[in-house]
Amino acid sequence: MATVASSERGAPVRRRAGVHRRARAGGTGALPMGVVTVWLSVIVLLPLAALTAKSLGDGTGSFWHAVSSRAAVDALAFTLVVSLIAAAINAVTGTLVAWVLVRDDFRGKGVVNALIDLPFALPTIVAGLTLIALYGQDSPVGIDVTYTRTAVLLALLFVTLPFVVRSVQPVLIELDREMEEASTSLGATPGQTFRRIVLPNLRPAILSGAALSFARAVGEFGSVVLISGNVPFRTEVSSVYIFKLQESSDSPVAAAAVSVVLLAVSLTVLVGIRVLERRGGDRGHA
C-alpha cells in the first residue's frame, strides 16, 4: 500500500515535470519566433547580404585588389592596433573604475556613475569636438595632440569607456565577500586575495568588456574624423578610409569590400565574446 501511495503521489510530480520540460522545449511559440526572424532579417541579415553582394559586384579580383591595396591595409592595420591598445587600457582602467564604484562610498558617486554612460548618449561627433576643445591648438591645458595617433587613441578611449565598467560592475556586486574575508583571515595580502580570489571571477567579464570595446573601436567614425586629421598612412582609420572611398564616384564597390573586411573582424570578435562567456559559465558551474 505504501508503495502504491508513493507512486500515486509521485505521478503528478512526474507529470508536472514533463509538462515543464515540454514547455521549455516548445519555447515561446512559432509566431513570436517568426516575428523575430523576419525583423532580424530585414534589419540585419538583408543589409549585410546586400553589402557583401555589392563588394563582389566587380568580381573577386576587384574585391581582393580593394582590400589589399596599400592604403586599405595600412588603414586596417592602424585601426586594429589602436583598437587593441584602447581595449587593453580599458580592461585595466575600467576594472579599477568598477571596483571604486562598487566597493567605495564617496560624495558624488551617483554623478560619477551617470558620467560613465555619457559616451553612450553623446553623439560621437560631439565627442570629437570636445576632445579638440581640450587637446587642440587652443587647449586650455597647453596640450595639442590633434592630427596625431595619440588623438585617435584618446577618442577611442572616450567612446569605449563604459563597456568594461558595465561588464565588471554587476559581477563585483554579486561577488561573495566571504571568500575574500576567509583569504584575509588565513594571512593572504590584499594583492594575493585579489589575484587568487577576485580576479578569476572577474576575468570573463573583463575579457567580454574588452572585446566589446575593441569591436566598438574598430568601427568608430564620428569621434576620430575631426581630431585625427585623416592623414593617409599615419592617422587614417578604416572607417574614414571607407567614407572617402564611398565619396569617390568610382569607388563604392571598393568601399563595400573594405566594409566587409571590417564586418568580418567585428563578427569574429563577437563570436569570441560568446565563446569566452560560455567557457566562463561552464567553469562557474563546474
Image: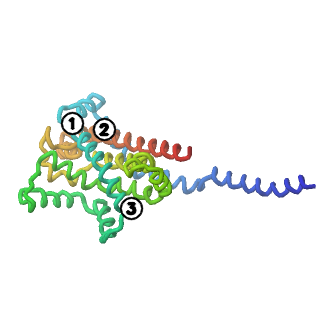
Placement of the C terminus among the 4 image quadrants: top right
- Residue named by callout 1: 72
Towards the viewer: 86 or 59:
86
Res. 87 in view: yes
Residue 64: percent from the left, percent from the top? 27, 30
Towards the viewer: 97 or 85:
97
Residue 67 in the figure: left or right of residue 274: left
Placement of the N terminus among the 4 image quadrants: bottom right
Secondary-structure class at tag 2: helix
Q: Are marks 1 and 2 in contact (CB under 8 Å)?
A: yes
Considering every residue shown, the one lying at the far top of the view is: 61
Q: Earlier in the sequence, mark 1 or mark 2?
A: 1
Distance between the alpha carbons at the discs numbered 3 and 2: 41 Å
Which-is-in-front pick, marks 3 and 2? 3
Task: Work out whether 226 lies above or below 54.
Answer: below
- Tag shown at residue 261: 2
Binning the other alpha carbons within 10 Å of mark 3 as few (below 14), some (14 to 19) or many (20 upward) gives few
Towards the viewer: 76 or 148:
148
- Residue named by callout 3: 103
Residue 109: percent from the left, percent from the top? 32, 68
- Tag shown at residue 264: none
Q: Earlier in the sequence, mark 1 or mark 3?
A: 1
Task: Work out whether 250 lies above or below 59.
Answer: below
Residue at screen point 64% across, 50% down: 25
User: Looking at the picture, which amino acid does disc 1 mark?
Assistant: Ala
User: Looking at the picture, which amino acid does disc 3 mark?
Assistant: Arg
